[in-house]
Amino acid sequence: MTRSKKPVFTFEKVQNTKGLATSLLALLLLVLPAMTLLGGCGNQVTVKRDDSDLVSKDVTKGGREAIYPDDKPSEPDGKVVYEKLSCAECHGADGKGVSGKAAIDLASAQYMRKQKPIDQYMFLAFGKDGLKHPSTLDSVSSQKTWNLVFYLRSLACPLMGATDYEQVTPVYGANCAVCHGPKGYGDGPLNKYNVLEPNPANFQNYQRFYDRTDDTLYDHIANGIKWEGMPNFLGKQDKAKGVKFDQAYIWKLVAYVRAFHSTNKQIAEANIGSPAAGSPSEKPKEGQTADRAKSEEARPEGETK
């Protein structure tokens, strides 16, 4: 009987077989993605609805949480929102309220000074359970809602005008900026390198000061905060500036602090191109204009300064 010989595979043949398999696998990896792309391009994708349906307000509006402004809320812009949303239909043009439609007098300083800006924002933005009131975020942005908040506050507690702002600024500079800084960042000379503990309040911190009522700010300025090193001012004097810190002036300081958190047209215009603190004013002194006119008349014709 003759036995058949088994085929003998050499090392070279095994190598060639593996090489062929590798080449085929590589070819498939190149071809399959291309076929998939070609097949995908051949099927047209259509959107049956309007493309605005693909965008949801909830994505940018967030949940029931405050979105703080990127810049100071504007009282004049808030008035525009007040008119756009027809708030006067219930609250009246002056905020005193329309009989049978609004029970709150927004023009009452006693009421408004007890309200936190953050609470007002949350109410306007999301409403409140048990109360029927439209949500502003259904119609305007969070920034415009903040504008509306400070416009409503101005109906009862008008924001500081340019004249008062100019007069209070040097008083703030002499008594408050040493800790709180000229721009209110809490970086005054006494807190250089953050040596004070705790650090003086940063008036530019919206989250902190939108959570304070005006009554709270008045109390802190008038009576101080002993455990934080904040001195009391009520009843004291700044003889150099000729100022007595009575109740009326403390309320001016409250309005000045609020000016770090919001702005109005008067202050905005006063800050544009205004001379730096300590620099000579461009305004002529009282009587100077008349004297200048007389000198102009007395000057020979053709003579220049």
Image (cartoon, helix red, strand yellow):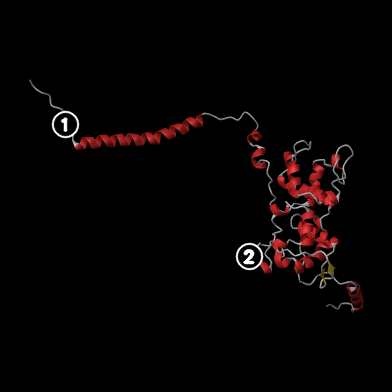
Label disc, if present, on residue 8 of the rendered structure: 1
Q: Nearer the viewer, residue 143 or 11?
A: 143
| Residue displayed at 28% across by 37% down | 19
Q: Nearer the viewer, residue 197 or 282?
A: 197
| Residue displayed at 74% across by 55% down | 261
Which amino acid type corresponds to the residue marked 2 in the rendered image? Answer: Asn
Marks 2 & 1, CB-CB < 8 Å contact = no
Image quarter of residue 276: bottom right
Res. 184 visible in picture:
no
State the SS at label 1: loop
Please give left or right for residue 10 compared with residue 165 in the image.
left
Figure check: 251 above or below 126? below
Q: Residues within 10 Å of mark 1 (few under 14, many from 20)?
A: few
Image coordinates of residue 75 in percent, x first then y, are 79, 51
Which amino acid type corresponds to the residue marked 1 in the rendered image? Answer: Val
Label disc, if present, on residue 194 of the rendered structure: 2
N-terminal of the pair, mark 2 or mark 1, is: 1
Which quarter of the rendering shows the N terminus?
A: top left
Image coordinates of residue 280 in percent, x first then y, are 79, 72
Q: Nearer the viewer, mark 2 or mark 1?
A: 2
State the SS at label 2: helix
| Residue displayed at 62% across by 67% down | 193
Q: Residues within 10 Å of mark 2 (few under 14, many from 20)?
A: some
